[in-house]
């Protein structure tokens, strides 16, 4: 249980970094008049690249060589999480919520899917007897 909590804390730390990258790129692009949905795709991709590197090496401490199957699974999970954030962002914007509030809520929605998918399917931890 202690190991799972530590993993969750590491995931949260990496997620905070990913979110800073995502928000930074998103609001930089929207500030220069890039449409918000295109900015979302670009900013999510930047955060996703950071996520793969840090979650693989630090959060889930994968020692095995990178395999195509792992990258494929990571991309599928992130595509699903991106779809969720994209949909939530779109719906909240159409509903009149501020861009900042919409972005926060959409990001939180995607994070749940991302953690579950990465933990259980992409970066599976080896079984321990603890």
Image: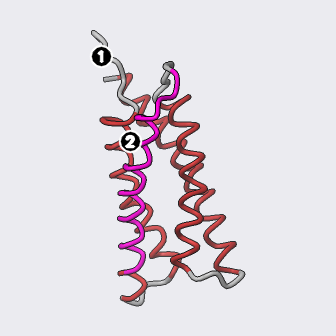
Residue found at the far front of this picture:
68
Q: How is the image coloured?
A: secondary structure
Extreme residue in the right direction: 32
> Residue 78: within the magenta?
yes
At 46% across and 34% down in the image, what residue appears?
Answer: 68
- What residue does disc 2 label? 73
Q: Give 67 or 25, whichever is nearer the viewer.
A: 67
Residue closer to the observer: 93 or 38? 38
Lateral position of residue 117 relative to residue 48, left or right: left
Give the main secondary structure, helix, strand or loop, of the magenta stretch. Answer: helix
Judging from the image, what secondary structure is the residue with disc 2 in? helix
Q: Crowdedness of circle 2 by 10 Å Cα count: few (<14), some, many (20+)?
A: some
Tell me, for residue 78, which label it has, or none.
Answer: none
Q: Which residues are magenta?
A: 65-90
Question: Which residue is painted at 41% across and 57% down in the image?
Answer: 79
Residue drawn at (49%, 19%), measured in percent from left and top? Answer: 64
Residue 102 location in percent, x, y? 45, 76
Q: Position of residue 47 (x, y in %)?
A: 57, 54
* Residues at marks 2 and 1 touching, judged by CB atoms closer than 8 Å: no
Which quadrant: the N terminus? top left
Mark 1: which secondary structure?
Answer: loop
Judged left or right of residue 21, residue 61 is: left
Is 1 or 34 nearer to us in this picture? 34
Relative height, residue 90 to residue 57 (above, below): below
Q: CA distance from mark 2 to mark 1?
A: 20 Å
Check the image and report above or below for 96 versus 114: below
Residue tagged by mark 1?
A: 127
């Amino acid at each position: 249980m202690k190991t799972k909590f530590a993993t969750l804390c590491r995931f949260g730390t990496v997620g905070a970094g990913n979110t800073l990258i995502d928000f930074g790129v998103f609001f930089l692009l929207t500030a220069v008049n890039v449409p918000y949905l295109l900015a979302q795709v670009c900013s999510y991709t930047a955060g996703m690249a950071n996520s793969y590197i840090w979650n693989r090496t630090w959060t889930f401490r994968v020692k095995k060589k990178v395999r195509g199957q792992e990258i494929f699974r990571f991309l599928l999970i992130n595509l699903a999480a991106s779809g969720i954030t994209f949909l939530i962002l779109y719906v909240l914007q159409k509903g009149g919520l501020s861009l900042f509030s919409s972005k926060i809520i959409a990001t939180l929605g995607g994070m749940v899917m991302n953690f579950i998918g990465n933990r259980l399917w992409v970066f599976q931890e080896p079984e321990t007897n603890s």
